[in-house]
Every structure is written in structure tokens, then in C-alpha cells.
Amino acid sequence: MELPPIIHDWFTARGWSIHPHQQDMLDRADAPALLLIAPTGGGKTLAGFLPTLAELADGQHKGLHTLYVSPLKALAADIKRNLTTPVTDMGLPIRIEDRTGDTSATQKKRQRADPPHILLTTPESLALLTSYEDAPRMFAGVQRVIVDEIHALAESKRGDQLMLALSRVQAMAPGLRRVGLSATVENPARIASGLACHPDPCEILYADPGPDPDISMLVTEERPPWAGGGAKYAIPAVLEQVKQHKTTLIFHNTRAQAEIFFHNLWLANDTDLPIGIHHGSLDRDQRQRVEAAMVAGTLRAIVCTGSLDLGIDWGDVDLVIQVGAPKNVKRLIQRIGRANHRYNAPSKALLVPANRFEVVECVAALQAARDHELDGDPPGPGPRDVLCQHILIRACAGPFSADDLYQQVRTVGAYSTLARADFDACLDFCATGGYALRAYDRWKRLHLRDGLWHLRDPRATRDLRMNIGTIQDTDTLKVRLRGGFKPLGEIEESFAATLTPGDTFLIGGQIVRYESLKDMSVEVTRRADKTPKIATFMGTKFATSTQLSQRILRMFREDDWPELPMHTAEWLHLQREWSKLPQADRILVESFPHDGRAHTCFYGFAGRNAQQTLGLLLTKRMEELDLNPLGFVSTDYATLVWGLTPVDDPASLFNPDALHDGFADWLAGNAVMKRTFRASATIAGLIQRNLPQARKSGRQATFSSDILYDTLAKYDPDHLIMQVTKEEALRGIVDFGRIEEMLTRTSGRVDHVILPRVSPLAAPMLLEPGRVPVVGAGRERLMEEMAARLMDEAGLSAL
Amino acid sequence: MNAHSFTFGEHRLTALPSGALWWGDRQLLCVSDLHLGKSDRIARRSGVMLPPYETQETLAKLSHDIAVTDPKTVLCLGDSFDDLMAADSLSDADDTTLTSLQAGRQWLWLEGNHDPGPLALGGTHLSIHQDGGLTFRHIASDTQLEISGHYHPKYAIPGAGNARSCFLTDAKRLILPAYGAYTGGLRATDPVLTRLFSGSVIAILTGHRAICVPVKPSAHPARPNRLRGSRP
């Protein structure tokens, strides 16, 4: 396709020429599906829009022509600005509007009656649009859909929901062509097949990726400590780097680490460099202020977490520092690739290992980056809770045929192998609840009439529409200064519940004192203390990816490690002399006495979450075998258990059948499972998250979803949502899938090494925070003792 | 014994860890806010179909308490059914369970705001019940030595885990926890509850054991609403 003269002239007038990949996109504008892989700043978004502008230039098209979907509201608003300017300059007859959760109700209504040529939206807003009865009219003429940052959506339920919504749009607009825009990913073909309307092909185009990034490990005078994640030792070296660069982003893996590092950086910042902090728990205003200051170039450094990954302009950032091992090479590369993109110079990044083992991890990550070996786990089949929500959304739009909907759903890559029986089970769940006890024959949500499924009560559409989406609110509470109005940020409810008045913690880089809870927010006062009493709230902990763990195990097979700093290489040599280095196809188990307790270290290299789960399962099994475990601690590579009785036969602990049984029992009562259940039950429409007037009234009438989980586990353990919950547990925070992977790769080959004292590799584990006590009846006893003491104090013990 | 006995008026009462109240001298078992048929009512009214097992679960719990105490009288302190229609649409199995529990003993249904009318079920229907200077009714009034339900109180010992549903009492008033499976709770520190009491308030938490603890007025993070059922 040639550019219309009006656009071509506009380019020429500015002395711009079109990039090769932008021309490629124009040439293939008729393809049913196209995926463009391009680094940020490569004119990726314009490449996506050029065919649309060319097709609309003659002013002939009426109604909606192109849907643009991005994972962030902010991005939709940005694109609107960036697109409107040239369109106005060129005088093109094109109307561009955005539609997100922030758009006003009148505007939204008008958009449905009189849609713009280009609509910029999010997956949730698009799903909502398809739920209206007039959706066929609005979408009838749609020609193209552009999914921006598709890599960020591809591995999430938001992406699944988007693709289901597109299958519906495609049914209303059979000529729809799909375009995906993605950053560098490990498996473009996978994203391409997720984008296409199955079984359409999807061609993949590559833009020039630019020069390889310049990544290295930060060399410090001080040696990294044996354990911990704060990287406090590196503060002077990091500060020195900040001084030498224009704008530095300092990434951390958790919010807690970001807060602590920022605090320490600030204490050491004797030249008063302007430094800010940015993470997901901070108040939105505060985050936006930091973003604005960054864009304006008034900040020299920003301490941040992944929340800064998307949505703001990184143009002037000339150094990215990653504190703590990157855990996942793909994320590291995508992050670094965003820096310095305005100049055709390589992006520059430094890795700062937080402890000695992370030195090994960082070197492995550097090698993986150099070899362009990115990591990622293959996605599972399309999640059924999202499908249930899709069925309910479809029902809102009017009566539908199960056969037609099933055919549509199968055009989505992730659901292309969905069995009819599974689809029918989801439909039955939506209609009757899907319980073994057929209780709701009279009050079905959907019922079949003349071969079509109808909503029993059309008024239900309002509640259903309010609950569209797959993003879960975490239970957080706002933090406010006493007497102040503006929130400082948010903390997890579970963290708030552990606070007692007088406790101090870090938020937004300042130390505050917990005073009280008022109107659902946490009241605090400012404190001038140097160190907070309670470290800080938790954040997401990423597990080291399977590929990176494998690379570390491969490194262990080498005779020597010239690429490692001397102190770390010597440490590994010492481990080899003393005991063994772990191997990929065997499980190394070390037993040694320490501090009067029998210690056993299990090197599974399964990642933090799976090692944590393994710790829970092993100690449970040890309890059954009367080995009296007292507690354990896990890292990405090992689990250390201590107890009263030495372990003689570790191989028996790894009996896969016993581990599976233990897993099933343990799942039944596990808090993580209950949280997973709540998420899936909400997505599937079993629990309503938003109901009109629900927030203020009748608090005593609400009850926890934990009760529903317990009830189902007891009376209906094979219910659809219980099945979905178990599937999710194989991944994510329980990550049983990686325990399975470890059991398969080692298949019972256990090396048990008995040592007189702790081994070099196990020693850091003794210093690791996050020890988990093994509790049986302990918690109950603790509560009773506390209650008795409080009764005593109140002079009521005789009661 | 996992229960907790205490003196109320001049009577010795026992809070069972299940949330039932046992009055040994009268061989009377009292339970409040069973909310039987709640999932049915929610499905009827909102289209949300919760697991329909709560009536079965609540009756199983009640059967256990009755088997252990073998009461002469069972007193249900109101909101026994989530509404009158729910009472009519009990499953045959639940109906049979209830009938067998009633056999050979006096059964008193006190009316609640959810079930204000007479029920087509065995037993006697009353608005209040008085005995030995104690008054039983669904919603607390200003009567002295009154035993009521309605508010579904719950309490968390600060720093020791999640809230549990609980009895609340001072010298003059006793409020029972909700006994039904699908019932949420109102924090004991909520003004709606604190203004009903004059003296220092004791909470008796339910669970594995009945645990007795003074209610500290200091606020504790309240859980945001998760799930909305019906009005109390």
C-alpha cells in the first residue's frame, strides 16, 4: 500500500522518512493478522496506525474503523494526544476518541450512538462495549484492531479476556484484521498464534532491534553480603553512578526493598541529588508527580519497581540499575531496552547482586542476555473462569445459541482445543451454578428458550456489567497523616492487621508511626527515627525462572569460573571440596547439626515459590514421620529445614505419591488457595465485587469468601471453580508445577551428604529472613495464652 | 471442656465453641441467626448462585450440639430463616433433618426481622421468651438481663489473627453470635454494638475452643466488604 499524498507530503515536509518496518506494515495491511516485534521508540505505534490513517484519508468510511487496545488507560490517553496532533496537522477527516474507565457516562453513551473512526480503549472497556444489545451496530464496520504492548497482555487473564472479546467483535465484523505490537519476547510465534483468529495464519514482522544493550555487573569495593536482599553495601557505588549519569532508574524486585534502599540512599545522599521513589503502593498523585518530574528532567534518579515498566516516557534515562538478581531475563531485557531509545546508542544497565548467591545468578543472567536466550513458561489452556465471565457478558447482549458461541470461542488461540464438554460445564455454571446438588432449578441465571439462552432477570445486566474485568483488587488500606487528607499510599490489609499503635514503618521513603485506624484508612504521624521498627510491607516476590535456574546448574558443572569475582568462585570451590555442587538431574540433600538442632538443606532449584511450597510439604511429611521439624526457610534454590531429629533417609521424603497426597490435603486448608479461589470465583461471577450501594451498608451481612471455599471443599470438591483454583495453584504463588518439574528431572536420584557442620552453600541460608515456623496446635495455644493474659490485666480472670 | 461458663443474672450459662448457648438448669439450648435458606434467597433476588450447602451445614452443626447436650428445649432466637419464602422452600432432606431434631423436645421459634411471621413448620412461634428473670428476644431492647441475637458480633484479639464470631456480654446483656454457615459479622468495636453496653464488655470467641477476652475499644483494621448478602 502506498501512503496517500497528504500523509506522504507531511512526512517529507518534516524531513522524515518512513521506517522499513512501517512500510512492511503498510504492504501487508490486508493480512488477517500481523505481529510486529519492535523495540520501544522504533515508531511501533505509528507503524500500527499508518494503514488506518491511509485507509481513512479519503473520508469515505462511516463509523468505527479501528479499535486500539492497550493495557493501560494512561497509554490510551497518551496515544490520543500523539495521534491527534499529526492528524490535525494533516487536516485528515478522522475522529479519534478514547474510552476507558475514566471516560464520563455521557461521553460513553454518545460514543455508542455515534462512534469515532478510531477508538482507543482497554480490554475491560472493550468487553463492556460488547455486552450492550446495540454492539452489532457499533462494531459492524470495524476494519482493524491494534493491540499495543501485546506481550504485556499475552500471559495474563486480561489477554484471554481481550481475545474472547475480539472473537465476538470478529463475529459482528467478519472483515476485521488484527495487528499486534510487541516488545522483544522469547517466543513470538506463541504471541502470534494467540493474536490470530484461529486457524488464520499470522505473519511476524521484525523492526531493527538496534544495538545490543551494554549490561554488566556493578563492581564494588565492598563484597556482597552472604544473605539478604537490601544491597545496602552497594549504596556508595550506586550513588557514584547516579552522579555520572543524567537520569538513572534503580529497579528493585519488591516494594519493600525499594523503600529500604531509597531510605538508605537518601541518608547517604550528602550532595542532595534530587532522587524520587515510585512503586505501586504509593498514592496515584504521588506517582504522577514523580513521573512528571522525571519527564521534565528534574530528577537524577528514581528508585522504583515494575510499576514504572509501562506508560511513561523513558527517553532521557541513560542508565538502568537492577538491584537484586533479575530473576527473569526477558523482563530485564524489556526493561533495559526502554532506556536511551532516542539515540541510536546501546542502552546501558548495571546489575547489583544483593548477596553472594545472587552474584552467580547475575552472571548467569548476563550470559543469557548475551546469548539472546529469553525465558518464559508456555501458557496453559485458556482459563475457564474468564470463559464463564465471557458467557455472562454475551448473555447481557441478548439471547445466544450455545453452538454459535462455542464455535466463536474456539477461534481464540488459547481456547482452540477447548472440549465441548468443558464449554458446556462453564455454560451450566453460568446457568445453574453447576453444583452437584441441583438446587437452583427455579432461580437459574440463564435459561434455554427456543434454542437460545436468555438471562432470567434482565435487570441482572447492571450487576454483571459492573463486575467485568479480571484484575483483582488486593485488599489494601490507604495511609494518611493524622490531620491530613492526602493519602501517602496504601498498605496491604494483612500488613495493617499486624500493626499496633506505636509501630513504625516506611512508606514513600519516610518513617511513620501507626496511630489508629479511622474510616478505613490507616492514620500515621511522621517520625524522625533513623530505622523503622517494622521493616515494611510485603511485595510480590518473583521466583527465578526455570531457564535461569538451569543455566546456574550448568555453570556448576564447570571446573572453574573465571567470569565470577574471586570471592564467589572461591566459595563455590569450597563447596565442591566440602560437599558437592548441586546438579540438574539429582537432588542434593545436606544434613548437619547447627546450634543444637538437626538441619537439612534440600537443593531443588525450583524457584522461591515452589521451594516455599516444598518446605511446607516436607515439614508436614516430617511431622508424620516423627522427625519433629521446627521450622524452615526457602530461597530460589533451596529449602533449609531444622528440627529435633536428624533426617536419615531423605529419598523417602521425595516419594512423589506421598508429596501429591500431602499437596492435596494441604491445599484444602491453605490461605493462598483461598485467595486464588476468591480471584477465580469473582472473575467467574460467583462472587460480585461491585454492587450498587454495597460499600456502605450492612457490613455484618457480608461474609468472607473463605466460607464458600470451605463449604465447597466439604460438599462439592469437584465443582468447576474448585477445579480452576487447583489449576491456578500449579502456577503462581504455590507453583506446584515446578515441584513436579523438579521431581521429573531428578526422578528419585537423591545425593545425601552428611556433614559435621554447615556447608559453604547452606551457610547463607542460616541468615536468610522469612523463616517459617511449623505450627500445629501452636496458634490456638498462643491465642488462649494471650486471651488469658488480657483477662488477667483487666482484672477479670475470675470470670 | 472447650466451652466457657459464666454467671448472668443469677444463672449459670455456658457458651459453646459452636456459638450456641447452653442453660444447664433449664436443659435449654439457644441458637441465634441460623439464616437457613440464605443461598436460595440470594439466588432468587440477585441471580448469584452461591454453593447451596449452607442449610445442610448449619443443621449438621446444630445436630451435633443437640446430640451432645440432649436439650429439653431448643430456642431459636430469630432470623432462623433468611426469609419466609426460604422457610417454605427447604429441601426434603433438610426438612426431614429438622423434623427429627424437633422430635421429643420443645422447640421455640422466636421471630426475627427476616422471619417475622409464623412458619409452616413444627414448634411454637413467639415474639419473646421469658424465664427466671431472663428475657430472650431477637433484637436488643432496653430490658435488663436480656439475651438477643441479630447483630452477628465478631472480634479479633489484636495481634492474634482474624476475627471470629463471638458472644458479647456485660453484666446486663448478652448478645449471641450468628450460628448460620453463611453469616458475616459486625465488629464488636462498632459503635452500633458498643452503645448497647454500659460496663466493660467481654467477648467469648467461637472456634475450636470458646475463648474469653475483654473487648478493647481501640480500632482494628476492619475487613473491606467482600460479599454482600442481605441485611442483618
Image: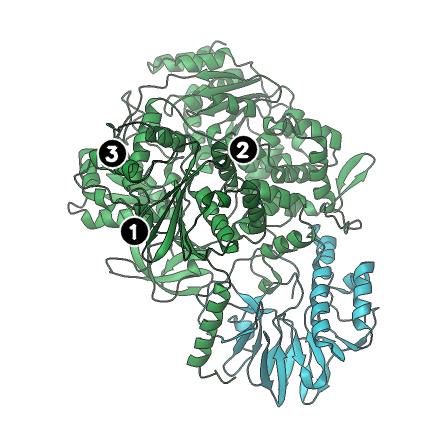
Residue A169: x %, y % from top left: 63, 28
Q: Classify mark 2: helix, strand or loop.
A: helix
On what subunit does the disc labeled 2 rest? A
User: Which chain gets the cyan colouring?
Assistant: B
Q: In this rendering, which labeled residue sits more in front, label 3 or label 1? A: 3
Q: Classify mark 3: helix, strand or loop.
A: helix
Tell me the quarter of the picture where residue B45 sits: bottom right
Q: Name the colour assigned to chain A in the rendering.
A: green
**At label 3, which amino acid type do we have?**
Ala
Tell me the quarter of the picture where residue A30 sits: top right
Structural crowding at the residue carrying mark 3, measured as other residues with C-alpha within 10 Å and reported as few (<14), some (14–19) or many (≥20)? some
Could you say which disc has been placed on residue A509 in the image?
1
* Circles 1 and 2 on the same subunit: yes
Q: Which residue is mark 3?
A: A569
A459 relative to A74, above or below? below
Q: Could you say which is closer to the camera, residue A797 or residue B154?
A: A797
Residue A302: x %, y % from top left: 29, 41
Q: In this rendering, which labeled residue sits more in front, label 3 or label 2? A: 3
**At label 2, which amino acid type do we have?**
Gly
* Circles 3 and 2 on the same subunit: yes
Tell me which label, 3 or 1, sits earlier in the chain.
1
Viewed as shown, does residue B1 lie left or right of A617? right
Q: Classify mark 1: helix, strand or loop.
A: loop
On what subunit does the disc labeled 3 rest? A
Is mark 1 in CB contact (under 8 Å) with mark 2?
A: no
Residue at left 67%, top 86%? B134
On what subunit does the disc labeled 1 rest? A
B122 relative to A639, above or below? below
Could you say which disc has been placed on residue A159 in the image?
2
Residue A12: x %, y % from top left: 36, 12
Residue A747: x %, y % from top left: 50, 34
